[in-house]
Image (spheres, grey):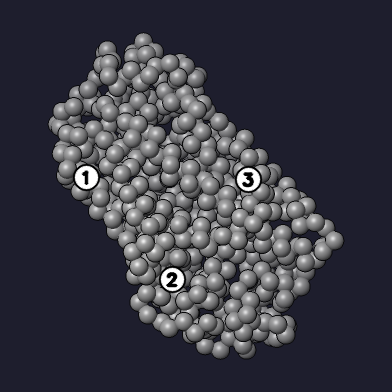
Amino acid sequence: MANRDIKDLANHSESLFFDTRDMERRQDSSSEKDDYGTLRVPGDWRFSAMSSAWSWMGLSTAIAYPLTGALLTLAFGAFSVMIGFLISMVLVGFGVYYTSLKSANEGIGKDLMSRSTYGYFGSVLNTLFVGIYLVILFSLETSVIAGSLAEYLPSVPYWLVALLIIAVFIPLGIYGMVWIAKLQTVTFFLYVIGIALVFMGLFSGWSELTNAAFAGEWWKLNPNNVPASWMTIIGATGAWMGAFGFMNIFASTDITRMTRRSERKKIAVLQVVINSVINSFLIGAMGIFFLASSNGVNPDPGVTFVWVLGPLGLLLVFVTQLRGNVMNMYLGTLAFDNVLAQITKKSYMRSWLLIPFVLLGFIMVVSSFLQYFSTIATFAGVVFASWVGSTFGESLLVRPLYKIPNWSEFRRAYLPNINWIGFTSLIIPIIIGMMATMGVWGDVLRATSVFVSLLLAFIFPVTLAAVLGKEKTIQQYFKRIPEVPMVETETMTCFVTGETEHKSDFVLCPFHGDNWISSTACATETKCNKMCQFKSAQNTIPIDQSI
């Protein structure tokens, strides 16, 4: 593999490697490709930045955010938690801005991005973990609704209540972005009205159990009298970033990938506002206020809603969880869709995965699994921090240094099974971080384990690249240099699948008689043994001669 080929590859037009067209969205595209879970989103299937941001706002109303803010206050005190929120704003803001620009520019989400960083099969690990964690969040949100409803229906078994609630979610999760945008619009106004009534009730004294008069200087609330220190601040920051911040940096790309390229800067700014200002600060702070209003007794906002509004509070709980859980289902099934496609070499419809997704969630709800959520979230923080660190480390340090293109290659024909630079930089910091979390090296490293993992994962890629050298480093990103078809049209039809895709989706395949086939046909081919990576295709136009 000649180094000059990589240099020329990096200098070529992006339109050769992903769809750069800005087009009007097709009106008949409500279910086509099931939202392109394993492909780049084409130029004629893009939404406005506002529509994309509006859909993502569904997660901002999830009770898990204020609930976690309240629980962290019990553990660390409000002062440390509020400082942690401010630190999180900066970290999440930078991360989300970068990933939003990239995902909207290339039309890819977290799963396809990961293939370039960790290799075609190496990316399965973090994608699988994200899918499982989203099932956990789905079950957590479902348990909040089930718990509130069970208070009104004590004669109905809890498991039946949970099952009925999940049955409501299934049809809501079948459709993709078009339906989600409409659902979020309708429920948003119900949420705003409900929250306004809650605050009105708190300040008007509608409930004897919770009242704004109890709140006082709520930002100084410290029910367990935990001394404020740099360790409590770092601990609170790490817990918050672990539960939501790090994951949202990448999870949000499954929405921003559908934004029109011409509005990629706009969606990046909107995502910073949503994930950094609203989710990382305002919603968490609201949870602290609700806790203070109950005299530091009740950390569950769902209970607060019911105390203040009665049956209307129960409706508000359902609306908040509905908005968040539909997004959990969408993001989670997208992740599992990619995992199954890579492992089984078969193409699936995302909606087919809803049943196993909700069944696993139901088991978590009715078992004792969620009792360990705080521990799970802590370990998840280490994993997500390593994911963010290794991705940003290889993207911001390795690629510029070795002139590797900054766009993400995801096609099986061009990728190694494992990119050892990214994969090693993910695994080793996870192991070290988890050992630190368990207290192997003392209290200081236990409190800072998430950030230790983040720093190590960020540094490891460039260190490993230096050890491997330039040629071997380049081979971690490309098993062979990508080629482009010499056609004047923007799209091509695959003779294997019959599907019409953008020309950048196609690969030159010696197994299929040196014909161009789509990335889907390539990924699902079971007999070729990836011969394209060791046998030169005939009639190939090298990339540095194609323009």
Task: Kindly give the residue lying farthest to the top in the view shown.
Answer: 513
Kind of residue sitting beneath label 1: Leu
Residue 512, image quadrant: top left
The three-letter amino acid code for the residue at tag 2 is Ala
Residue tagged 1: 464
The span from disc 3 to disc 1 (Cα, nearest Å) is 38 Å
Residue 43 in view here: no
Q: Which residue is mark 3?
A: 360
Tell me the tag on residue 236.
2
**Image height of 94 relative to 495, above or below:** below
Place of residue 483 in the rendered image (x, y in percent of width and height, measured from the top left): 28, 25
Of pointers 1 and 2, the one earlier in the residue sequence: 2
Q: Position of residue 101 (x, y in %)?
A: 36, 50
Report whether 401 appears left or right of 124: left
Name the residue at 43% across, 16% down. Answer: 527
Look at the picture and state if 284 lies above or below 146: below
Work out how far the residue at label 3 is from the one at label 2, CA to CA, in angstroms: 30 Å
Front residue of 384/11: it is 384
Q: Name the element at disc 2.
A: helix
Q: Which mark is residue 163?
A: none
> Residue 419's image quarter?
top left
- 10, above or below 486, in the image: below
